[in-house]
Image (cartoon, helix red, strand yellow):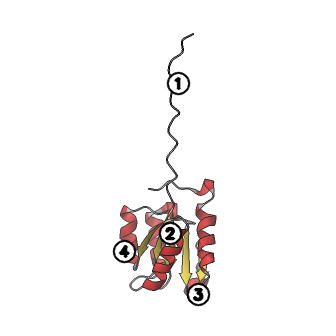
């Protein structure tokens, strides 16, 4: 039997990459609040004030989930939703839409599989949505 110097233990695995959430909201104050709240929960947050910016951002920065305002300046959030799902099918079921008028016909008749968060909302609702969607071990997408 030969004995040699003990092998050092293998290095620990790198910490898991934080999930990334894209916030698409044209109201700057609300967008900043959402960014801060989600970042404090440990999420990586991307932010866009318009549908066009969000669409371009996702071309270079993958996201695990999207928080999307319905009323955006040049394109509705619902139209952006369809464009995102077409371009990024992995986001299906990972988009929540925010609306100040959740009873409006175009929101009420929306039959796509996404969460609707009625404004004004409690910020805990946003955190709960993110945790339920992203924090379960089997829900991680590995984007990035």
Nearer the camera: disc 2 or disc 1 = 1
Element type at mark 2 = helix
Residue 111 visible somewhere in the drawing: no
Which of 16/49 is in front? 16
Residue name at image x 45 percent, y 82 percent: 76
Query: Looking at the picture, how far across and down is residue 116, in whole percent?
Result: 60, 78
Say whether disc 4 or disc 2 marks the residue closer to the N-terminus. 2
Element type at mark 3 = loop
Q: Quadrant of the C terminus?
A: bottom left
Q: Say the numbered circle drawn on residue 120.
A: 3
Which of 119/73 is in front? 119
Give me the C-alpha separation between circle 2 and circle 1: 42 Å
The residue that mark 1 highlights is: 6
Say whether disc 3 or disc 4 marks the residue closer to the N-terminus. 4
The residue that mark 2 highlights is: 39
Give me the C-alpha separation between circle 4 and circle 2: 20 Å
Asked whether the beta carbons under mark 4 and mark 2 sit within 8 Å of each other, the answer is no
């Amino acid at each position: 039997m030969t004995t040699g110097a003990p092998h050092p233990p293998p290095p620990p695995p790198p910490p898991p990459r934080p999930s990334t959430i894209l916030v698409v909201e044209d109201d700057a104050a609300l967008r900043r609040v959402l960014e801060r709240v989600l970042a404090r929960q440990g999420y990586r947050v991307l932010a866009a004030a318009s549908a066009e910016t969000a669409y371009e951002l996702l071309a270079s920065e993958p996201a695990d989930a999207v928080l999307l305002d319905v009323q955006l300046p040049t394109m509705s959030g619902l139209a952006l939703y369809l464009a995102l799902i077409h371009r990024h099918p992995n986001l299906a079921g990972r988009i929540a839409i925010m609306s100040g008028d959740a009873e409006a016909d175009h929101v009420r008749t929306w039959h796509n599989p996404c969460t609707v968060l009625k404004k004004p909302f409690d910020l805990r609702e946003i955190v709960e949505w993110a945790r339920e969607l992203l924090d379960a071990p089997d829900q991680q997408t590995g984007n990035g």
